[in-house]
Image: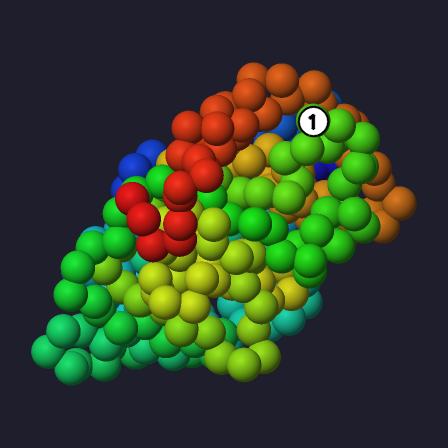
Amino acid sequence: MKLTIFHLYPDLLDLYGDRGNVLALAARCRWRGIDVEIRRISLREEMDFSEADILFLGGGSDREQSLLVQDLSTRSSELKAAIDDGLVMLTICGGYQLLGQYYQTRDGEKIPGLGILDFYTIAGNKRLIGNVIVETSPELLGSMSENISQQSDEVGVHNTMVGFENHSGKTYLGPELNSLGRVLRGYGNNGEDLQEGVRYKNVFGTYLHGPLLPKNPHIADLLLGLATRRKDPAYQLQILKDSLEKAAHHAVIERFLTAGSIAGSK
């Protein structure tokens, strides 16, 4: 088995160590004996989405996102076709926002997104910052049950996601889209509806930086499980011990999810 990871715009989208997510995916492949190739692709460089098994898009500033929209908009139809064909994709913060219909600035200007998914983002008046804990949605738990062994959850991490958010954009999902889960602590998509992130087919968008995957090995394995089974439906991911990763995950929950914690708190 070999997986090819497209890391798009790594020179422009790497806030808060987002590239650690790509390193985590590559490490978890190597530990299992899966060959992995990482292709770093930036502005105006060729990219054939049919050659990607996983596509990663991190977060960046508003200026950088504007440059990327111009570059990616010329390939949005190819990207949409790849997504509909099951391409596995992880997008963080600004990369997540790019997939939507538009980003509305505080001045009311609507900057078009790629228009691939039915959501929009509005610039808020304050930054939404802090540690986040999310209760995993039933849909996401179902995908984990189908694509990764439940034996990998012997100490119980599948029910939650942890990370760090820092954004002023407030994202609102369309009625046909599912979030990744319910916010137990923090702000999530907009600080209002207690939802965090988006899931569409094999596309995952989230505001969780941190980076996300080292603290959430079950999410990393879900991406790898979806990517490997897309190539070989009978492929089974080898179970990893993950004692350090799960300890880091639980440490965040024990530190921040106290009896007095509520969604929307720092």
| Quadrant (top left, top right, bottom left, bottom right) of the N terminus | top right
| Residue 49 image point, x, y percent | 56, 59
**Which of the two residues, 262 or 104, is positioned nearer the viewer here?**
262
In the image, is 256 to the left or to the right of 22?
Answer: left
Q: Which residue is mark 1?
A: 155
Report whether 99 appears left or right of 121: right
Residue occupying image coordinates x 21% and y 67%: 124
Secondary structure found at label 1: loop
Q: With respect to residue 101, does 11 lie above or below?
A: above
**Which percent across, then down, holds residue 230?**
75, 53
Q: Nearer the viewer, residue 257 or 45?
A: 257
Residue 158 falls in which quadrant of the image?
Answer: top right
Left or right of residue 52, residue 124 in this image? left
Name the foreground residue: 205 vs 12. 205
Task: Say if 241 sits above or below 203 in the image.
Answer: above
**Furthest-left residue in view?**
107
Report x, y in % for residue 266.
29, 44
Q: Which residue sits at x=32%, y=72%?
A: 121
Q: Image quadrant of residue 108? A: bottom left
Q: Amino acid at mark 1?
A: Val
Q: Is residue 262 left or right of residue 16?
A: right
